Image (tube, grey):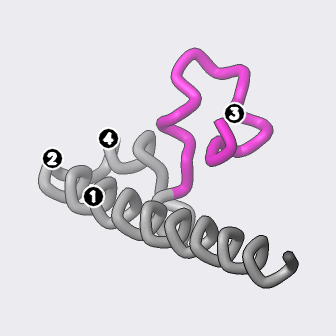
């Protein structure tokens, strides 16, 4: 839920409102306007970028906890 905008958290399917691109395209928009390939590419790119960011944050957090002791 941390990726879902606050105003969409009460929706029946909140995950389709997660912005997948810097331009703010969501799965909801891509389902209506894009092809299956565009949906898969956008979701895959967002997932890879999010995983890299979370891993970097985790590594930074682990490093800062080691250096603060």
Tell me if residue 66 comes above or below residue 2 in the rendering.
below
Specify which label sits upstream in the sequence, 3 or 1. 3
Q: Residues within 10 Å of mark 3 (few under 14, many from 20)?
A: some
Which residue is outermost to the right? Answer: 68
Tell me if residue 30 comes above or below residue 61 in the rendering.
above
Q: Which residue is mark 1?
A: 44
The picture places residue 58, in percent across and down from the top left corner, at 60, 65
The Cα–Cα distance between marks 3 and 2, rounded to whole angstroms, is 23 Å
Specify which label sits upstream in the sequence, 3 or 4. 3
The Cα–Cα distance between marks 2 and 4, rounded to whole angstroms, is 8 Å
- In the image, which is nearer the foreground, mark 1 or mark 2? 1
Q: Are marks 3 and 1 in contact (CB under 8 Å)?
A: no
Specify which label sits upstream in the sequence, 1 or 2. 2
Q: Front-most of 56 and 10?
A: 56
The picture places residue 29, in percent across and down from the top left corner, at 43, 47
Q: Which residue is mark 2?
A: 36
In the displayed structure image, the side of residue 36 where residue 19 appears, left or right? right
- In the image, which is nearer the foreground, mark 3 or mark 4? 3
Mark 2 element type: helix
Q: Are marks 1 and 4 in contact (CB under 8 Å)?
A: no
The picture places residue 67, in percent across and down from the top left corner, at 78, 84
Q: Which mark is residue 31?
A: 4
Residue at 50% in and 67% down: 55
| Magenta stretch encompasses residue 38 | no
The Cα–Cα distance between marks 3 and 4, rounded to whole angstroms, is 17 Å
Residue at 69% in and 33% down: 8
**Which span of residues is magenta-colored?**
1-19
Specify which label sits upstream in the sequence, 1 or 4. 4
Q: Residues within 10 Å of mark 1 (few under 14, many from 20)?
A: few
Q: Quadrant of the N terminus?
A: top right
Mark 3 element type: helix
| Magenta stretch encompasses residue 8 | yes
């Amino acid at each position: 839920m941390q990726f879902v905008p606050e105003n969409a958290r009460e929706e029946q399917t909140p995950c389709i409102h997660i912005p997948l691109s810097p331009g703010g395209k969501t799965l909801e928009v891509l389902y209506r306007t894009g092809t299956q390939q565009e949906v898969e590419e956008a979701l895959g790119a967002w997932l890879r970028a999010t995983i890299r960011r979370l891993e970097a944050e985790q590594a930074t957090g682990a490093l800062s906890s080691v250096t603060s002791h």
